[in-house]
Structures are given as C-alpha cells and as structure tokens.
Amino acid sequence: AAGVIQSPRHLIKEKRETATLKCYPIPRHDTVYWYQQGPGQDPQFLISFYEKMQSDKGSIPDRFSAQQFSDYHSELNMSSLELGDSALYFCASSLSRAGYNEQFFGPGTRLTVL
Amino acid sequence: AQTVTQSQPEMSVQEAETVTLSCTYDTSESDYYLFWYKQPPSRQMILVIRQEAYKQQNATENRFSVNFQKAAKSFSLKISDSQLGDAAMYFCGEGSQGNLIFGKGTKLSVKP
C-alpha cells in the first residue's frame, strides 16, 4: 500500500539559511498535518491543511510557512534557521480532517542546523 | 486545552511477559478519540491502537489492548506476550480537532 512520502529524508543547513520540506500524502487523502519532534521530545503539532486551505495552526514559528498544493502535496518552508530548529519533521495525512480518521505518518525529514 | 500525561518515562518487561503502560488525559471535548503510537529506533510513527471515546468496549489489536476508564480519564495500554520487537518509545495521545496531542512518551525495553 502507498504510504506518505517525505523528501528529503535528511537535510543539513547552516544558521540563517532556508529549508523546504516536502510531503506527498497517501492518494485520496485530502488532509495533511506537520509535526516537529525535537531530540528526546514528543511530536508537536505545527500546522494542518484540508482541501488546500489551512485548517489549524499549532506552535509554528512565524519564520515557518506552509501550503498545500492542487495535487494535495504540501511544503513546509523554514527561513532564518536557528540551531533549535534541528529536529525530526513529520508529515501525516488522513482522509478528511475528522478527528476519528487515522493519521498516517511519513518517515520524517531529519533537519540538522549547524 | 487538551493535555496528555504519561507518568512512566521508562518501563522494562521480560520477553513473553505482560506489561501495562499508563496514560491519563484531560479534554473539554465531548467527542474525541485516544490512541497509542509506537516509535521504534527507526523513528517511524506506527499506530498501535485507537479508541473512540463514545465506545464503551475496550479496543484490542492482537497482543495489544487498552483499559479505557472514561470517568477517570485514563487510557492504559497492555502488551501481552511481549516480544523483542516491541521495544520502542510509546506515545499516548488524544485527537478531537484533527491534530494530535501526545504525551511525553514511555520507553519500553524488552529483556530476552
């Protein structure tokens, strides 16, 4: 079965640089979620999209922005990177944004900021 | 605001034995669901089991079962016949508005 695809899997950036993370949801899934997991931490919700519109916002810094495109893939743009942005970034997708629908997680993108 | 608490940072179990991981939650929502995700060393998030709050019957998935006490806002996970492959970080969580709220996690070790 098709799974959530995230690219790149690993990314190394310098402070103050920008990064773009991509997420390709499971086919027919219309909802995408982004989570950030710092070292030794639980995943923290950043932002979500339903039918290409932002549906909910969590603890996402103003330096980050995201969008969902017409083909339902999503991109998380991160600017002015800081050392504290080093984390594992998960994308998850679900069929509609109803809370009872299972969220399927991608393998994550490991971002290292030097 | 929703909160999820896992009071056991680490647990250990002997292979083939049974272990129970604790979780409590707090939510103002009337319609919500609870879940346990497993995160092995690969860091992949894998759904173990899920429970809709309106269902009184405890969910089970093979060797995994939950004890859902709605009034006490408790949602523990029982792993029976533990296997080496069960060693992982386990996150309890709650979902009601779409996004998921996780606890801090319990690291489970399985001894051969």
Image: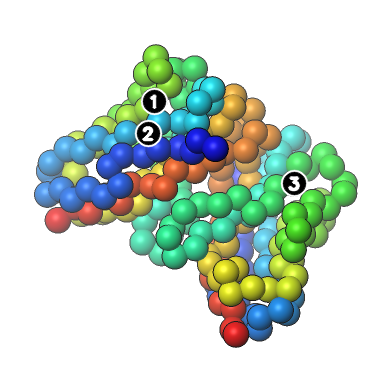
| Amino acid at circle 1 | His
For the residues labelled 3 and 2, the Cα–Cα distance comes to 27 Å
Q: Residue at x 57, y 69 (%)?
A: B85
Residue A107 % position (x, y): 42, 48
Height in image: B35 above or below A5? below
Answer yes or no: do the residues labelled 2 and 1 have beta carbons within 8 Å? yes
Mark 2: secondary structure: strand
Judging by the rendered image, the residue that carries numbered circle 2 is A23
The quarter in which the C terminus of chain A is drawn is bottom left
Height in image: B84 above or below B96? below
The quarter in which the N terminus of chain A is drawn is top right
Q: Earlier in the sequence, mark 2 or mark 1?
A: 2
| Amino acid at circle 3 | Gln
Which chain's residue wears label 2?
A: A
Residue with the most extreme front position: A1
Height in image: A94 above or below B25? above
| Amino acid at circle 2 | Cys
- Of residue B84 and residue A48, the one placed in the foreground of this image is B84
For the residues labelled 2 and 1, the Cα–Cα distance comes to 6 Å
Q: Quadrant of residue A24?
A: top left
Camera-nearest label, 3 or 1:
1
Q: Residue at x 45, y 18 (%)?
A: A53
Judging by the rendered image, the residue that carries numbered circle 1 is A73
Mark 3: secondary structure: strand
Judging by the rendered image, the residue that carries numbered circle 3 is B51
